[in-house]
Every structure is written in structure tokens, then in C-alpha cells.
Image (cartoon, rainbow, N blue to C red):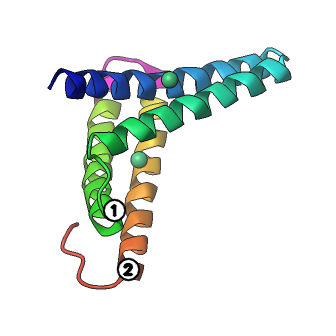
């Protein structure tokens, strides 16, 4: 049981590190350090592989149809949550946060629509929104 808890925490921490390394890679690129940017991007991909392996070990990855159905639900929620967050950020005057919540809300919508398309290609009924 302790191992599972540690793996869950490790999955979260690896997932966090992916985003941080990607953001830091972009920063290094912006600052004119392409080799460091490339190195940080490679580390981000390593962390992604680590996170993916723990996701698998933790049973978060099912058959493809189930995975798509689960992620569709997640994208639907993400789109709604981003919309709510955008309103809060706007009301609080966080313009950059507002803009990015809006942009990422559109990305989540695109993910949702893309997953629906892929699911329909798999055939059979699609009961989710
Ligand atoms: Fe790692
Ligand atoms: Fe998404």
C-alpha cells in the first residue's frame, strides 16, 4: 500500500516537472541559450516517460476506448473549469491569467472535439457528451 501511495506522489511530481522543464526550456530559448533549451526539453521528455510509466503501473491506462472515454470526460471538465477560472481572473483584474484561461479553454474544447472524432472512428455508440 505504501508503494502505491509513493507511486501516486511520484506520478504527480513527475507530471509537475514536465511542465516546469518545458517552461524553463522555453525561457532558455528566449534568453538565447538553444543548447540549454534543448537539454531541458530532453529532461522534460524523460520526466514524461517516467510519469507515463507510473501511470501505467498505477492502472490509470486501460484499453483505448476506455482511455478516450475517460479523457473525454476530463476534457469536458477542463473546458468548464477554464471558463469559470477565466471569469474569476477577469473579475479580479488578472489580465494575463484571464487571456490564458480563455486560450486554454479553447484548447480543451479542441481536445474534446478531437477525442470525439477519434472515438467515432473507433465505431459503436458514443454515449458521452
Ligand atoms: Fe523523473
Ligand atoms: Fe486538454
Q: Earlier in the sequence, mark 1 or mark 2?
A: 1
Specify the principal SS of the magenta part.
helix
x, y percent for residue 83: 31, 40
CA–CA distance in space, label 1 to label 2: 10 Å
x, y percent for residue 88: 28, 26
Q: Which residue occupies 27% across, 85% down?
A: 124
Residue placed most toward the observer, 80 or 63: 63
Q: Which residue is mark 2?
A: 122
Residue 90 shown in magenta = yes
Residue placed most toward the observer, 25 or 43: 43
Residue 41 shown in magenta = no
Asked if labels 2 and 1 touch by Cβ distance under 8 angstroms, the answer is yes
Q: Quadrant of residue 126?
A: bottom left
Q: Which residue occupies 28% across, 49% down?
A: 74
Residues shaded magenta: 88-97
- Which part of the image, by quadrant, shows the N terminus? top left
Task: Answer above or below: position of 126 versus 12.
Answer: below
Q: Which residue occupies 76% across, 27% down?
A: 38
Numbered circle sitting on residue 68:
1
Q: Considering the numbered disc 2 on the image, is that residue within a helix, a strand or a loop?
A: helix
Please state the total of marks drawn on the protein image. Answer: 2
Q: Which residue occupies 35% across, 45% down?
A: 56
Crowding around mark 1 (Cα neighbors within 10 Å: few <14, some 14 to 19, many 20+) is some
Q: Does the Cβ of the disc 1 residue fall within 8 Å of ligand 2?
A: no
x, y percent for residue 67: 31, 59
x, y percent for residue 112: 37, 59
Q: Considering the numbered disc 1 on the image, is that residue within a helix, a strand or a loop?
A: helix
Q: Quadrant of residue 63?
A: bottom left
Crowding around mark 2 (Cα neighbors within 10 Å: few <14, some 14 to 19, many 20+) is few
Amino acid at each position: 500500500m505504501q508503494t502505491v501511495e509513493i507511486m501516486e506522489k511520484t506520478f504527480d511530481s513527475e507530471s509537475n516537472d514536465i511542465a516546469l522543464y518545458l517552461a524553463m526550456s522555453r525561457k532558455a530559448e528566449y534568453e538565447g541559450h538553444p543548447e540549454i533549451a534543448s537539454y531541458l526539453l530532453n529532461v522534460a521528455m524523460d520526466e514524461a516517460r517516467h510519469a507515463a510509466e507510473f501511470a501505467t503501473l498505477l492502472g490509470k491506462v486501460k484499453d483505448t476506448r476506455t482511455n478516450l472515454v475517460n479523457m473525454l470526460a476530463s476534457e469536458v471538465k477542463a473546458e468548464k473549469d477554464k471558463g469559470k477560472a477565466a471569469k474569476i481572473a477577469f473579475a479580479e483584474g488578472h489580465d494575463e491569467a484571464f487571456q490564458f484561461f480563455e486560450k486554454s479553454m479553447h484548447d480543451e474544447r479542441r481536445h474534446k472535439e478531437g477525442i470525439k472524432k477519434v472515438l467515432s472512428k473507433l465505431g459503436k455508440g458514443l454515449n458521452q457528451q
